[in-house]
Image (cartoon, rainbow, N blue to C red):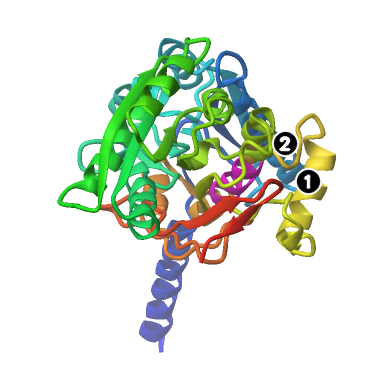
């Protein structure tokens, strides 16, 4: 009897110890029992200051979450700084966030040039470069850069989607591409070239680049028009996407037009370009657009509009960058919630490397999200849409 009682006590102690071990909280720099610090940079100033709406929406989202009690009982502190879409400035601000503010991770930075400038630094430090807003192929390389995870449809997938449609809609198409002379634009161009390899019913006949510091791209559009192209792909940031659409109309050029989804905002791009000028432009979408009447009764859209009214009244709720930032903030919410009490940098990367059909608020139902430890590219599909002068409409 004594032996049995003694054994039971030993087993009970062992189980209690095991339970305590299982419940042990684990933290890296930037996390504690009460707080998680997340670093973020975006262009609040400079040539793509339209991105600032995304930063303000991100901050507003976590102000809302914190007011409701945070995530797993912790307040989420977002430290968002201006990088002006300048690689040197992005490095300076990122170093501050890591070395002075001691954040757990860098999250949601917009732009290929800015993320490229900080990628080696963050990977060398073992700091997650998490859910960044770029689809450049170089950011999906878990073997070489295990701390970098993108959260945007890859530019290769986007351009293949366009080329596949062009081949069906316009056999024998002659394609012209305007692209930013940086990692963002060059990766889009590479996507077009790759999609056209071995193809006989469509040809890339002209390409022109611009610098983000340029005042206009009028000369580039003139050169592309003179090539005889009947398809135009705009791999540009918002300001130049608007200029291109407007200039094409002024010249009386009527190509089949495509605009990168990063520059498909109605308020930031199509309205400045002229809504009539923008009719017929095509993009590859992944979001429900709150400005579209078909989503007027959608619960996720209603929640988003209520959020913007209360937590980010400064920005237009129909702004594409606000909308995508809200969706991306929802994915970060999922990651932090899933991480639970293991708020180590290593565990964050385990979570983002094992996304399996997670639905993010405001994503179209057809969008599939899936990652593996060997492939961090989450988006597998895009929905082609055409602008009708007021709204983006699905192309079947």
Q: Quadrant of the N terminus?
A: bottom left
Residue 294 forms part of the magenta stretch: no
Relative to 333, residue 229 above or below:
above
- Does residue 319 show up? yes
Label placed on residue 307: 1
**Residue at the limit of the structure toward the bottom, as seen here:** 1
Residue 324 forms part of the magenta stretch: yes
Relative to 11, residue 279 above or below:
above
In screen coordinates, is 69 left or right of 143?
Answer: right
Quarter of the image for residue 147 reads top left
294 or 370: nearer the eye? 294
Mostly what secondary structure, the magenta segment?
A: helix
Residue 309, image x, y percentages: 84, 41
Q: Which residue is mark 2?
A: 60
Q: Residues within 10 Å of mark 1 (few under 14, many from 20)?
A: some
Of the numbered discs 2 and 1, the one sitting upstream in the chain is: 2
Which residue appears at 82% of the width and 34% of the height? Answer: 313
Q: Identify the magenta region.
A: 323-332
Give the total number of marks visible in the rendering.
Answer: 2
Q: Are marks 2 and 1 in contact (CB under 8 Å)?
A: yes
Q: CA distance from mark 2 to mark 1?
A: 8 Å
Residue 32, image x, y percentages: 56, 37
């Amino acid at each position: 009897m004594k032996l049995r009682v003694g054994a039971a006590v030993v087993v009970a102690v062992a189980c209690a110890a095991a339970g305590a071990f299982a419940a042990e909280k684990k933290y890296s720099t930037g996390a504690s029992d009460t707080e998680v610090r997340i670093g973020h940079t975006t262009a609040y100033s400079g040539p793509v200051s339209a991105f600032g709406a995304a930063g303000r929406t991100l901050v507003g989202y976590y102000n809302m979450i914190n007011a409701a009690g945070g995530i797993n009982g912790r307040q989420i502190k977002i430290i968002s700084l201006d990088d002006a879409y300048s690689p040197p400035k992005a490095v300076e601000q990122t170093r501050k966030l890591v070395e002075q503010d001691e954040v757990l991770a860098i999250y949601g930075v917009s732009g290929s040039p800015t993320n490229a400038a900080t990628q080696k630094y963050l990977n060398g430090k073992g700091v997650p470069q998490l859910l960044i807003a770029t689809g450049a192929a170089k950011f999906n390389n878990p073997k070489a850069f295990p701390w970098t995870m993108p959260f945007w449809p890859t530019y290769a997938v986007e351009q293949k989607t366009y080329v596949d449609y062009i081949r069906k809609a316009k056999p024998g198409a002659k394609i012209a591409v305007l692209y930013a002379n940086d990692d963002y634009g060059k990766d889009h161009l590479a996507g077009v070239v790759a999609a056209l390899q071995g193809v006989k019913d469509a040809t890339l006949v002209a390409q022109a680049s611009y610098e983000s510091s340029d005042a206009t791209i009028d000369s580039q559009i003139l050169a592309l028009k003179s090539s005889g192209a009947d398809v135009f792909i705009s791999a540009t940031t918002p300001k130049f996407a608007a200029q291109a659409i407007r200039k094409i109309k002024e010249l009386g050029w009527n190509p089949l037009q495509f605009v990168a989804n990063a520059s498909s905002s109605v308020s930031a791009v199509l309205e400045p370009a002229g809504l009539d000028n923008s009719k017929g432009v095509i993009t590859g979408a992944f979001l429900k657009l709150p400005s579209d009447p078909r989503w007027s009764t959608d619960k996720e859209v209603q929640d988003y509009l209520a959020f913007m009214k209360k937590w980010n009244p400064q920005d237009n709720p129909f702004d594409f960058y606000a909308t995508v930032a809200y969706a991306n903030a929802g994915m970060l919410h999922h990651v932090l919630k899933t991480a639970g009490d293991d708020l180590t940098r290593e565990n964050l990367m385990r979570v983002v490397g094992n996304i399996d059909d997670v639905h993010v608020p405001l994503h179209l139902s057809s969008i599939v999200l899936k990652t593996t430890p060997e492939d961090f590219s989450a988006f597998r599909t895009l929905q082609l849409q055409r602008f009708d002068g007021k709204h983006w409409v699905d192309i079947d």
